Structures are given as structure tokens and as C-alpha cells.
Image (tube, rainbow, N blue to C red):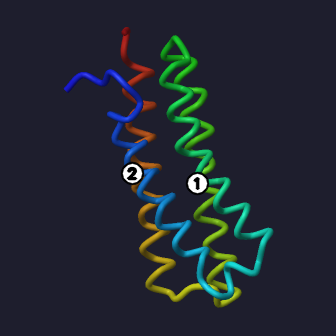
Amino acid sequence: MKITKFEDIESWKEARTLTSSIYNLTRRAGFSKDYGLKDQIQRACVSIMANIAEGFDAGSNKGFVNFLNFAYRSASEVQSLLYVGLDQSYLEAADFKTNYDEAATVKKLIGGLIKYLKTSSH
């Protein structure tokens, strides 16, 4: 399948799923009152999606890879912030694992796309 719009990119789709999950998670009692952490983890998720979308329109593989690297690092930030939520008892271990693993899936997909773009002559 040829990718014609950023919405076709698997890593963007997975990042959207992760973002929705994080927004639902941060609506819960403890998380919702920790405004700094809530804002930071939400921004990091949105950054993943935004950077994939922006990179798609960067005009070159090199430009796209630069944006994908930002998206990858934002996914790592989400994983790190999930630890804060866990340590503050804002989420259960199962919710931590689900969201952490989803962020890892996003990273894997982004990493695969980066590898492809670096070796592609398109």
C-alpha cells in the first residue's frame, strides 16, 4: 500500500491510540489533579503524532527522519513519565504496562520507518 497521507502511517495510527489512552488515563482522580505531570505526558503524546505528520510533509527523507527522531524521543518521554505516574500511585501496574508497551510499539514502528527511509532512495 502506498502511503499518500500521514494518516496512512502505522506509527501515526499507533501514536493516536496511545494518545487517546493517555488522555483517558490522565482523567482519573490523582492524575487529573497533578497538572504539571498531566500536561507534560499529554504534550509528549501529542508531539509524537504531530512530528510524524509534520515529517511526512518535510519534503525529503532526511527531513522526515529528523521529525521521526523527535517523535521517537517523545515516545521515550511518555514511557519515563508513566513511571512518575506509577510511583505516585496515579495508575495501577497493569495500566502502566499497557501504556508503556503501547509506547514501545510506537517506538518500534518509528524505528522501522527511520531505517527504511535511511536506506530508501525515494
Residue drawn at (30%, 24%) of the image: 3
42 or 71: nearer the eye?
42
Residue 109 left/right relative to 50: left
Residue at position x 50%, y 87% from top? Answer: 93
Residue 74 in the image: x percent, y percent? 62, 49
Expressed as whole percent of the image width and height from the top left, the position of residue 2 reads 24, 22
Q: Badge 2: few (under 14), some or many (20 or more) residues near its Cα, within 10 Å?
A: many
> In the picture, residue 90 is in which quadrant?
bottom right
In the rendered image, residue 88, in percent from the top left (x then y), is placed at: 70, 87
Q: Is residue 2 above or below residue 24?
A: above
Q: Nearer the viewer, residue 35 or 47?
A: 35
Quarter where residue 83 is shown: bottom right
Q: Secondary structure at mark 1?
A: helix
Q: CA distance from mark 1 to mark 2?
A: 11 Å
Relative horizontal placement of residue 87, taking residue 54 as reference (left or right): right
Type of amino acid under label 1: Cys
Mark linked to residue 45: 1
Q: How many marks?
A: 2
Q: Which residue is mark 2?
A: 14
Q: Is residue 4 above or below residue 106?
A: above
Label 1 neighbour load within 10 Å: few <14, some 14-19, many 20+: many
Q: Which quadrant does the N terminus fall into?
A: top left
Q: Secondary structure at mark 2?
A: helix
